[in-house]
Structure formats: C-alpha cells, structure tokens
Image (tube, rainbow, N blue to C red):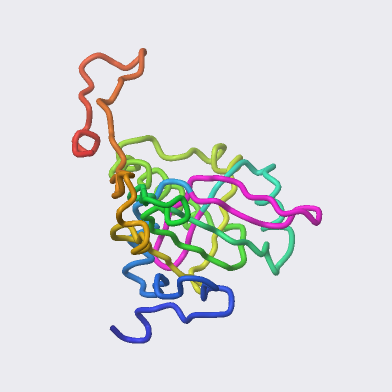
Amino acid sequence: MTATDSYEPTALTVPTRSRDRARYDHETVHSILDEAYICHLGFIRDGAPVVLPTLFARVGESLYMHGSTGSRPLLAAGRTDPGLPVCVTVTLVDGLVLARSAFHHSLNYRSVVVHGTAHQVTDEAECRTALAAMVDAVAPGRAADSRPPTARELAATSVIRVDLAEVSAKIRSGPVNDGAEDLDLPHWAGVVPVAPVYGTPVPAADLTPGIAVPDYLTAL
C-alpha cells in the first residue's frame, strides 16, 4: 500500500484510547461508508453543538448530504466562502459482546469519523450526481429506475459536500475479553452477531398492476 492509499493521521483523527483499533487506509474507510445508510452530521449552531442524522453518499473522495434550501446547516454551509466546520460520523454494529463482567461488555463495530468543512454544491451537474448517489445508497440501481429531479425540485434542494481529507476508521472485532479472575463465573459469555435483515418488498397501494419487483431489490 502506498502513502496515497491512506489518510494522514492528525491530532483530530488519532484516538486517545485503543489506538490499535484505528485504521486510515482508503479501502477500509470507503467500505464502511459505502455500507452505511445514515451518518450523523455535527456542527455548531448559535454557539451550541448540534448533531443531525441524515442520509449521505460517498462519491470518490467526497461525502454528500442534502436537505431543503431552508435547512440551517445547509444555509450555513453556503453563507460564506469558508463554509461550515463539521464532524461526520458513521457507525455499523456487527455484534453484541457479552462478557461475564459488566465492565467488559462491548460491541463489535466499524466506524468512520470525518473532520472537515462543508460547502454548498452550486454546480448543477455535481448536484445531480450527488443526488443520484444518495438514491443508489439506499438501493443500488435505484437512481436509474426512477425519475430524476426536475429543475423545480433541484431549486428546492440543497446539497453539501465534505471532502475526505481528515479521516479515520475504528474497528472492534473478535471475542469477549474477560479477565482470568472471571472465567469461572456462572454467566454466559460470547458474541451475538448483528446484521441487517431485509423483508419482502411491499408494493405501494396505487402501484400500476404488472410492475414487478426489480432485480436489485430481490438481490437484497
């Protein structure tokens, strides 16, 4: 792996605890971002911290998020040239780690933290690319199987971009880490795997008869 395949660690991206769990390579970071649906967007509003859950998508080395043109973070991102300082976090839970002692309970997880500046996207082509990516983030292939935004819909939607520069991933995997003094305690210990489960697609009540469930949904 070359230097360009990893993000440079910084004071903001090096964890204070469990540094051995940190990852900076593009492959790990991108795989976590591409698997997740929701990110949490943190910023300062009127002197107080605010964290909002929102849909997002990665395109290359940028993250995109959207909202209405009246959204406060979107307005702040486009108000001035410097943009809006933000912290974006994504977490995937892979397992419940149940130890014999309460102290050693944990989660198996994969997470990404992005520090950067959000800028409002003003180029129409970039905006359309970002919105299509967000539709595909929900169900890959869906953007090509739906009507694209009209000019009026684009005018009512704002998109912000955060470039992936100051980034880190953190991963916890593996078994329980009980202390030797607790191994004989009469409590079950182990890991309960956690994974998303997709149910059978439920058609809209007013769906035109004869339209089949698309392959990209049955593939889920």
Viewer-proximal residue among 124 and 37 = 37
Total marks placed = 0
Residue 24 lies in quadrant: bottom left
Q: In this view, does 7 lie above or below 209?
A: below
Q: Is the magenta stretch mostly helix, strand or loop?
A: strand
Q: Which residue is drawn at 31% across and 20% down?
A: 203
Q: Can you give x and y, in whole percent of width and height, for residue 159 in the image?
A: 56, 51
Q: Which residue is drawn at 68% across and 62% down?
A: 84
Quadrant for the N terminus in the image: bottom left
Q: Can you give x and y, in whole percent of width and height, for residue 137 in the image?
A: 37, 47
Residue 6 lies in quadrant: bottom left
Viewer-proximal residue among 169 and 65 = 169
Q: Which residue is drawn at 19% across and 39% down?
A: 219
Q: Can you give x and y, in whole percent of width and height, for residue 69 in the image?
A: 65, 44
- Residues rendered magenta in the picture: 39-64
Residue 52 relative to residue 166: left or right: right
Residue 212 lies in quadrant: top left
Viewer-proximal residue among 15 and 71 = 15
User: Hey, which residue is sitting farthest right in the picture?
Assistant: 46
User: Hey, which residue is sitting farthest bottom in the picture?
Assistant: 3
Q: Can you give x and y, in whole percent of width and height, for residue 49 in the image?
A: 71, 54
Quadrant for the C terminus in the image: top left
| Residue 40 magenta-highlighted | yes
Q: In this view, does 83 lie above or below 186?
A: below
Viewer-proximal residue among 76 and 93 = 93
| Residue 7 magenta-highlighted | no
Q: Is residue 114 above or below residue 42?
A: below
